[in-house]
Amino acid sequence: MSHDLSASELPTELHEFLPGAVLEKDRMTLRWRDLTVSSVFQPIISFSHSRVVGHEGLVRIAGKSQTTITPPDFFQLVDTTGELLQTDRACRLMHAWNARATDGWLFLNLHPALFGRFDADSSARMVAAMVSATGIPAHRCIIEVVEEAVTDRVRLEEGTAALRALGLGLALDDFGAGHSNFDRVWRIQPDVVKLDRSFAVRTEHDEMARRVLPRLVSMLHETGSLVLLEGIETLDQALIAMDSDIDFGQGWFFARPAADTLRDSSAVAPALDALWARYENHIRAHEDAHHERIAPYLNAIGYAGVLLASGVPLHNAALGFLDQPAAECFYLLDAEGRQVGTNISAREQRGKGVLRELGQMPGARWSRRPYFRRALQHPGKPQVTRPYVSISSGNTCVTVSAHIRMNGNEHVICGDVDWELLQRGELIPSVRKR
C-alpha cells in the first residue's frame, strides 16, 4: 500500500523538494496529477575495468490505465503549469534515493530550460539534503547538460560554474547530435562528454566515420574530458567504441534500463567477456592483415633508399615502389623536410584537380608531417602513418617513409599509398608517367 511520506520516514530537509512523493517498500515514486513517475537505471560500463562504474537515472511515466507518456511530453506538460523546477528537482532526488545503496557515479539529467537559472541558495540546500539523506557524495552525482540545448554562452558558463560550486560533476550530453559546437567543450571542460547514439549507428556502417571517431575521442581527451558512447546496441558497435579508445559505454548491448541498480557487474559479465574476446581477435586479425598488405610497400621504400644511397637516379630508384598496386606517388625530402623536385606519380592520380596541381608544385616543406619526423628518429627502419587525407590529391592515403644518406647528407624518401585500394587489396596495374 502506498502512502505519503512523513517526517519519520525521510529527513525533514527533503520534504520541501519532494511534492507528491510516495514510498512503497522503501522505494520512492512521484505523483503528479493522475500520473506516476518512477525511476529506472541504466548501467554505465568502463571498458578498461570491465565493470559497472555508474548508472544513469531515467524517468518512466505511467497513467492510471497503464498508458505511458514520454519524458519530453511529460516535462512539456509540467512546464506549462509552472512546476518545472520543482518537478525536475524532485525527479533527481527520487533517483538518488532509489540508488542510494549503489556505489559509483549517478548521472542525473537537468532540464535544459532550467540550466543557469536556478536559485543558488535553494540549489545548495537541495544538494545538501540529497547528500544527507542518501549518503551519495556530491562529486559522484554527474549532472547531464544537453549539448545543443544551451545556446547562450554566458548562461552556459555561469550555469556550469554554479554546478561545480555545489561540488557536482558535469557531463555534456548528446554531443554530436544536431549542430554540435566544440567550443562549448573548451569553455566548460566537462568531466564526461557523452557522444550521441548516432555515432554508434553510423560508425557500424561507415568506414570514414570509423576513421574519424578515434581522432574526435583523442581531441576530447586532450581537453581533459572522459568520453562515453550512448546507445550501444550491438557487439560491433561496442567493438568500435573500444577500438576508438572510448572510456565508457552505455546501451542495450550491456543492459536495458531497470528499476534497480546493479550491485555488482555479474549481470553484464557475459557481454563484456564476449566483447573482450572479440576485441582481442579483431586486433590480432587487423594487425596481421595490415602488416601483410603494407609489408611490400615498406620493403619497396627501403630498397629504394638503398638504391638512392648507392647513386641510382631518383626516378629509377622509385620504380620498384611505384610498381606496387596501390602506390600513388614517390618523393624525396631534404634534412629540413623540403621536397626535392616534385612528386613522381605511379599513374594518373584520381582526386581533386586543384590538389593534383599542388602535388606538382616544387618547394613544398613537409617537416610537420609524422612520416618525416619518425623517419629521422628511426634510421634504418621504414615507417608508416595512420590514414589521412593527402593535400596533394584529396585521397585518403598512408605514407611510408625511410631515412637515408645521400652524398653525406640526410634525406627522407616517402611514398603515398592509396588507403582504400590497400584495404580492398585490389590489384590495379600502374601506369607510370615516364
Image: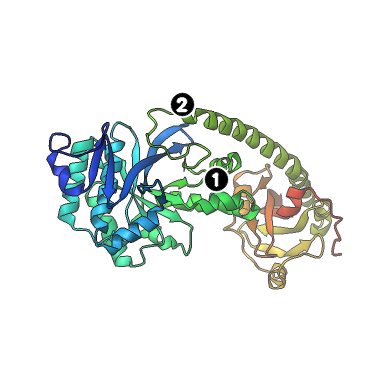
In the image, taking residue 337 as reference, residue 68 lies left or right, namely left
* Residue reaching furthest to the front: 65
Q: In the rendering, at what x and y percent does residue 430 appear?
A: 85, 57
Which residue bears the numbered disc 1? 244
The residue shown at (32%, 32%) is 102
In the image, taking residue 387 as reference, residue 20 lies left or right, namely left
Q: In the rendering, at what x and y percent does residue 2 appear?
A: 25, 37
Structural distance between the alpha carbons of marks 1 and 2: 25 Å
Quarter placement of the N terminus: top left
Q: Which of marks 1 and 2 is in front?
A: 2
Q: Which amino acid does label 1 sit on?
A: Ser
Which residue bears the numbered disc 2? 266
Between 285 and 408, the one nearer to me in the picture: 285
- How many numbered discs? 2
The residue shown at (54%, 40%) is 242
Query: Crowding at label 1, few (<14), some or many (≥20) Cα neighbours within 10 Å?
Result: some
The residue shown at (70%, 65%) is 393
Between 181 and 274, the one nearer to me in the picture: 274
Between 96 and 74, the one nearer to me in the picture: 74
Residue 343: name its quadrant: bottom right
